[in-house]
Image (spheres, rainbow, N blue to C red):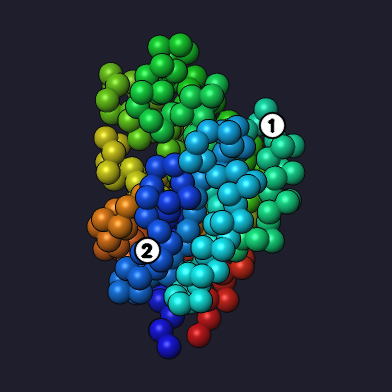
């Protein structure tokens, strides 16, 4: 019988995401060695269900089967889904979440795209910057994240300031930093009021941003404001996951120390004995 881990990584991308090739079993095996409870969190993008390698209604049952098989051997695993939120199709997203909610242990809302372009990939961000400029992109990104929290469709929100990943590659802009800090803190208050968890996402550490989403100093302010956090490495490979493990443990330690650690409702029983 395996011991119950006290560390959780609730954001792993598997071969069911277009940008990963790792099986659920491979992560689960490594997680057992690292003594981490893992949550698989593949992308579901309603706007892109027709693109190759993207999850859609037809392929979702395969993910559920793969999870059941994995869980039979490795008990310390959970199944989540990273669902893109679009304010211009909020009812479509709500309908999808209602359809699939009971198949998953938790649902995480996320924002990647503005005007159909992903702000989390440099090529598409560059196109967007040339069209509308950086400050409006940052404002609109946070508007969308705010909408995702207010929708109350989700247990948590992924990488709340993920739009900042490539910002250091652009000329320094104090307005951008001001928007980032102000709007991140506003999201903390919103999450405190709605009870929706914020993710401490470690992926910014491997990007030009070089910080967690949100940064450690902002996390501290948000915890003081009453927000609660779960932790996600946002790994796309086994080496991402393994390399993030020491940081993941460290983040758990300070969140627990500051009273800001949380888990989605369906996983909370894992914290007891
Ligand atoms: Zn994401
Ligand atoms: Zn992700």
Nearer to me, 19 or 170: 19
**Location of residue 88 with respect to 156 vertically, above or below:** above
Which badge, 1 or 2, is on the more N-terminal residue? 2
Nearest to the eye among marks 1 and 2: give it: 2
- Left or right: residue 242 versus residue 60 is left
Callout 1: helix, strand or loop?
Answer: helix
Residue pictured at 74% horizontal, 37% vertical: 91
Instruction: Identify the mark at residue 113; answer none if there is no mark.
Output: none
- Badge 1: how crowded within 10 Å, few (<14), some, or many (20+)? few
Q: Indicate the position of residue 54 as horizontal and vertical percent values.
A: 52, 41
Residue pictured at 36% horizontal, 23% vertical: 123
- Left or right: residue 51 versus residue 215 is right
Q: Indicate the position of residue 29 as horizontal and vertical percent values.
A: 35, 70
Residue pictured at 52% horizontal, 64% vertical: 67
Is residue 146 something that shows in the picture?
no
Nearer to me, 153 or 66: 66
Q: Indicate the position of residue 179 as horizontal and vertical percent values.
A: 45, 28
Instruction: Identify the mark at residue 27; answer none if there is no mark.
Output: 2
Residue pictured at 44% horizontal, 42% vertical: 18
**Location of residue 2 with respect to 62 vertically, above or below:** below
Q: Indicate the position of residue 107 as horizontal and vertical percent values.
A: 60, 54
- Badge 2: how crowded within 10 Å, few (<14), some, or many (20+)? many
Is residue 4 something that shows in the picture?
yes
Q: Is mark 1 within 8 Å of ligand 1?
A: no
Callout 2: helix, strand or loop?
Answer: helix
Residue found at the very far top of the displayed protein: 131
Nearer to me, 37 or 224: 37
Q: CA distance from mark 1 to mark 2?
A: 33 Å
Query: Which quarter of the rendering shows the N terminus?
Result: bottom left
Task: Say which quarter of the image contains residue 253.
Answer: bottom left
On the image, numbered disc 1 is attached to which residue? 89
């Amino acid at each position: 019988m395996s011991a119950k881990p006290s560390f959780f990584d609730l954001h792993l991308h598997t071969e069911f995401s277009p940008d990963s090739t790792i099986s659920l079993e491979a992560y689960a095996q490594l997680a057992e060695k690292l003594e981490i409870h893992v949550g698989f969190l593949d992308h579901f993008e309603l706007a892109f269900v027709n693109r190759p390698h993207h999850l859609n209604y037809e392929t979702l049952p395969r993910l559920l089967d793969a999870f059941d098989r994995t869980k039979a051997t490795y008990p310390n695993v959970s199944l989540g889904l990273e669902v893109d939120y679009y304010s211009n199709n909020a009812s479509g997203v709500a309908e999808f979440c209602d359809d699939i909610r009971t198949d998953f242990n938790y649902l995480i809302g996320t924002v990647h795209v503005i005007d159909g372009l992903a702000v989390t990939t440099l090529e598409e961000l560059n196109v967007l910057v040339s069209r509308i400029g950086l400050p409006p992109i940052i404002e609109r990104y946070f508007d969308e994240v705010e909408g995702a929290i207010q929708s109350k469709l989700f247990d948590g929100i992924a990488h709340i300031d993920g739009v900042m990943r490539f910002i250091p590659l652009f000329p320094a802009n104090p307005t951008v930093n001001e928007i980032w800090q102000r709007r991140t803190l506003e999201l903390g208050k919103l999450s405190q009021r709605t009870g929706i968890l914020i993710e401490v996402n470690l992926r910014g550490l491997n990007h030009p941003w070089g910080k967690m989403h949100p940064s450690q100093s902002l996390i501290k302010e948000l915890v003081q404001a009453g927000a609660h956090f779960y932790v996600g490495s946002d790994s796309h490979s086994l080496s991402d996951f393994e390399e993030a493990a020491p940081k993941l443990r460290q983040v758990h330690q300070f969140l627990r120390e500051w009273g800001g650690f949380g888990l989605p409702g369906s996983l909370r029983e894992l914290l007891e004995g």
